[in-house]
């Protein structure tokens, strides 16, 4: 089978709010937009934001690797997202993980590359 493209779909009760969140926090680029779905690209990955979501809290499995989890978590909250687990230092190293939620209830992780 030849796979032409891979994208991950998330749901949004308010698609415009979700697009604003992902463009503001992660620098997403809008690839395609119609009344049902908007496709965005972040670091060569494609996420489809599908309208009609109910705003329920949902684990997505998405993980965004960033240089600094603490400042990344601050950007998430500044854009209207939430932290479900604050970044915490481990073994005298800076935090490598923060559990987050976007404006639509989609949960994701921020991670830092470990050396």
Image: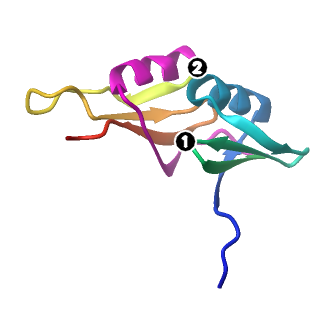
Callout 2 crowding tier (Cα within 10 Å): few <14, some 14–19, many ≥20:
some
Which residue in the protein does label 1 denote? Answer: 57
Asked if residue 65 is among those painted magenta in the image, a careful observer would answer: yes
- Observer-nearest of 51 and 7: 7
Residue depicted at x 60% and y 48%: 44
Asked if residue 1 is among those painted magenta in the image, a careful observer would answer: no
Check contact, mark 2 vs mark 1: CB within 8 A.
no
Left or right: where 64 falls relative to 24 = left
Residue depicted at x 78% and y 44%: 31
Residue 69 in the image: above or below residue 7: above
Of the numbered discs 2 and 1, the one sitting upstream in the chain is 1
Outermost residue, left side: 91
Which residue in the protein does label 2 denote? Answer: 80
Judging from the image, what secondary structure is the residue with disc 2 in?
loop
Mark drawn on residue 48: none
Residue depicted at x 47% and y 41%: 108
Left or right: where 86 falls relative to 100 = left
Judging from the image, what secondary structure is the residue with disc 1 in?
loop
**From the image, which quarter does the N terminus lie in?**
bottom right
- Magenta span: 52-79
Left or right: where 82 falls relative to 84 = right
Q: In which quarter of the image is residue 43?
A: top right
Q: How far apart are marks 2 and 1 (CA)?
A: 15 Å
């Amino acid at each position: 089978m030849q796979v032409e493209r891979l994208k991950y779909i998330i749901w949004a009760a308010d698609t415009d709010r979700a697009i604003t969140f992902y463009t503001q926090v992660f620098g997403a680029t809008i690839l395609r937009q119609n009344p049902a779905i908007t496709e965005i690209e972040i670091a060569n990955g494609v996420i489809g934001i599908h309208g009609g979501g109910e705003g329920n809290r949902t684990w997505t499995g998405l993980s965004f690797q960033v240089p600094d989890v603490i400042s990344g978590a601050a950007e998430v909250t500044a854009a209207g997202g939430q932290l479900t687990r604050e970044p915490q230092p481990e073994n005298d190293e800076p935090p490598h993980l923060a559990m987050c939620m976007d404006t639509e209830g989609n949960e994701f992780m921020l991670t830092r590359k470990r050396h």
